[in-house]
Amino acid sequence: MSLEIEATTAGSFLKYVEAEFAAPSYARRVAGNARLVRLARYVGGSHSGFTVSLNACWDSSGVTFSPRGGGPETTGGAVDENVFLSRLDGVLKLVEAESETVRQC
């Protein structure tokens, strides 16, 4: 795992990222960039006890991904996610997230 990921994530989100990167189905970005369409404070839901809660929507429709194990390249889509950060050792770290694929942001 990269030092950047370890410095900025913890808890269940770090475990998720480690598993995702190790999965045979992991696909790396080969072209294009995701676009952050919305970033706002997230209020509500069943989550409490976090220092910061944010809602973001990413549009990756212009991104091409290549699966690690080979196979056809795929195009990304839009993802709406709530991210939850806590202060650990004096640093804000992303510790939990919920996301869903949406038609558009």
Image: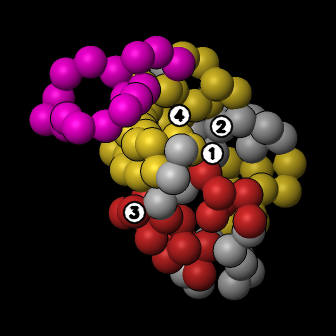
- Report crowding for label 2: few under 14, some 14 to 19, many 20 or more residues within 10 A (C-alpha): some
**Residue that carries the numbered disc 3 in the rendered image:** 11
Name which residue lies at 86% across and 48% down. Answer: 31
- Whether tag 3 and tag 2 are in contact, CB under 8 A, the answer is no
Nearest to viewer (mark 3 / mark 1): 3
Q: Is residue 89 left or right of residue 52?
A: right
Question: The disc labelled 4 sits on which kind of residue?
Answer: Ala
For numbered disc 3, what is the local secondary structure? helix
**Residue that carries the numbered disc 4 in the rendered image:** 78
Q: CA distance from mark 3 to mark 1?
A: 27 Å
- Whether tag 2 and tag 4 are in contact, CB under 8 A, the answer is yes
The stretch of residues the image draws in magenta is 39-54
Q: Position of residue 72 (x, y in %)?
A: 71, 68
For numbered disc 2, what is the local secondary structure? loop
**Residue that carries the numbered disc 2 in the rendered image:** 60
Q: CA distance from mark 3 to mark 2?
A: 26 Å
**Residue that carries the numbered disc 1 in the rendered image:** 76
